[in-house]
Amino acid sequence: MVQIFGQSRCKATRAAQRFFAERGVKVQAIDLSQKNMSRGELQSVMRAVGGVAALYDAAGPRARERGLQHLGPSEARLIELLLEDPLLFRTPVVRNGAQATVGPAEDTWKSWVAALKKQG
């Protein structure tokens, strides 16, 4: 099942949900303002997207609110920041098994949908 981690007020998250809905793919939507990723989920997504830096929205409003926009935190510190404050994620984070994307990634999602349709 495809999981979409994001925020209900995020345009890109809503677009991802719409993308899969229009293609008849069931998704599990997780609102990061309500529930965070577990450490295991975060580790899995990090492996799929090439590291924690891809997940951290350094230029986002939450990073500015917390005064983090000019920091270059270590990978370990970034992991802790994301686990304590899920609003620091770049969204949407879309996960399909061991695969994941960050931000809009329709080309990748199309290939996932095609593979899911073949599986039946």
Image (cartoon, grey):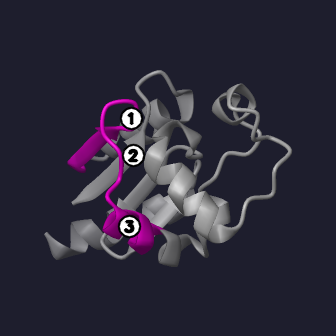
Q: Quadrant of residue 44?
A: bottom left
The answer to which of marks 2 and 1 sits earlier in the sequence is: 2
Residue displayed at 42% across by 55% down: 94
Task: Judge from the rendering whether residue 13 lies leftward or rightward of residue 18; answer left or right.
Answer: right
Q: Quadrant of residue 22?
A: top left
The residue closer to the viewer here, 88 or 77, is: 77
> What element does badge 1 sit on?
helix
- Location of residue 4 with respect to 101 vertically, above or below: above
If the image is split into quadrants, where does the C terminus sit?
bottom left
Q: Which mark is residue 5?
A: 2
Residue displayed at 75% across by 41% down: 68
Label 2, label 1: how far apart the Cα atoms are: 14 Å
Label 3, label 1: how far apart the Cα atoms are: 15 Å
Label 3, label 2: how far apart the Cα atoms are: 17 Å
Residue displayed at 29% across by 57% down: 2
Residue at mark 3: 112
Can the viewer see residue 24 in this picture? Answer: no
Residue at mark 1: 18
Q: Position of residue 117 (x, y in %)?
A: 23, 66
